[in-house]
Image: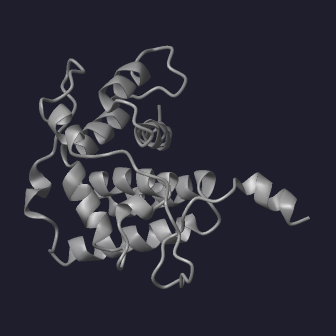
């Protein structure tokens, strides 16, 4: 499986987690040979890295939201951002541009019309901050998947502190500079309604 597919399948798993499903169980099922959206070691590692650092990841995302909370983001945008920020901050190597590009492609494929620009802006800002040397001190504490596929001990503890995302509520007078995109009708429905 190539890395693009691995990231996409990890995104789908993390999106499922936002509906209250158990992430350990999602990973276990997705690592089975006959899984609909299978996870390889790289994809499972991304999910485990996110789970081990969920609070720090959400704090980093929220630091770029200008008065918003992560709970107000669409589930699609938030899952994409969580995965990319976990990879950029706590993953192996310095491949921010690849992580950002893959996240933008996921947002174009699964998000609403403006989601990819929002995702690109948040991740670009975090990457510039990291390049300037402002990355969190615990960025070296990477949790990699165990060779036997076992879930790291940190995973259940980290998941207890991360609640599933509630549906966003838009303010009545939102401005583009201060708001993030939220979920609306699917793209196909919007196109049909405009005809």
User: Residue 64 location in percent, x, y?
Assistant: 33, 74
Colouring scheme, one of rainbow, by chain, secondary structure, one colour: one colour
The residue depicted at 40 percent of the width and 50 percent of the height is: 165
Q: Is residue 192 left or right of residue 37?
A: right
User: Residue 128 location in percent, x, y?
Assistant: 29, 76
The residue depicted at 13 percent of the width and 64 percent of the height is: 136
The residue depicted at 51 percent of the width and 14 percent of the height is: 34
Report if residue 45 is visible in the image: yes
As drawn, 99 above or below 125: above
Report if residue 89 is visible in the image: no
Position of the C terminus, as image quadrant, is bottom right
Q: Residue 10's image quarter? A: top left
Q: Nearer the viewer, residue 76 or 10?
A: 76
As drawn, 17 above or below 152: below
As drawn, 190 above or below 45: below
User: Residue 131 location in percent, x, y?
Assistant: 22, 74
Q: Is residue 192 left or right of residue 89?
A: right
| Number of numbered discs overlaid on the protein picture | 0
Q: Residue furthest left?
A: 137
User: Residue 47 location in percent, x, y?
Assistant: 32, 39
């Amino acid at each position: 499986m190539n890395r693009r597919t691995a990231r996409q399948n990890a995104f789908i798993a993390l999106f499922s987690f936002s509906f209250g499903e158990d992430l350990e169980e999602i990973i276990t099922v997705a690592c089975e040979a006959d899984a609909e959206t299978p996870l390889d070691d790289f994809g499972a590692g991304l999910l485990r890295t996110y789970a081990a650092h969920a609070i720090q990841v959400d704090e980093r995302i929220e630091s770029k939201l200008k008065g918003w909370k992560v709970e107000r983001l669409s589930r699609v945008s938030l899952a994409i951002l969580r995965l990319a920020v976990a990879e950029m901050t706590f993953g192996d190597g310095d491949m921010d541009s690849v992580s950002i590009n893959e996240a933008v492609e996921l947002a174009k494929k699964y998000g609403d019309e403006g989601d990819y620009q929002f995702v690109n802006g948040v991740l670009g800002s975090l990457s510039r901050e990291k390049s300037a040397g402002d990355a969190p001190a615990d960025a070296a504490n990477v949790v990699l998947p165990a060779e036997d596929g076992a879930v790291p001990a940190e995973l259940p503890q980290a998941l207890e502190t991360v609640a599933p995302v509630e549906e966003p509520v838009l303010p009545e007078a939102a401005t583009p500079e201060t708001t993030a995109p939220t979920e609306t009708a699917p793209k196909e429905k919007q196109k049909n309604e405009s005809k």
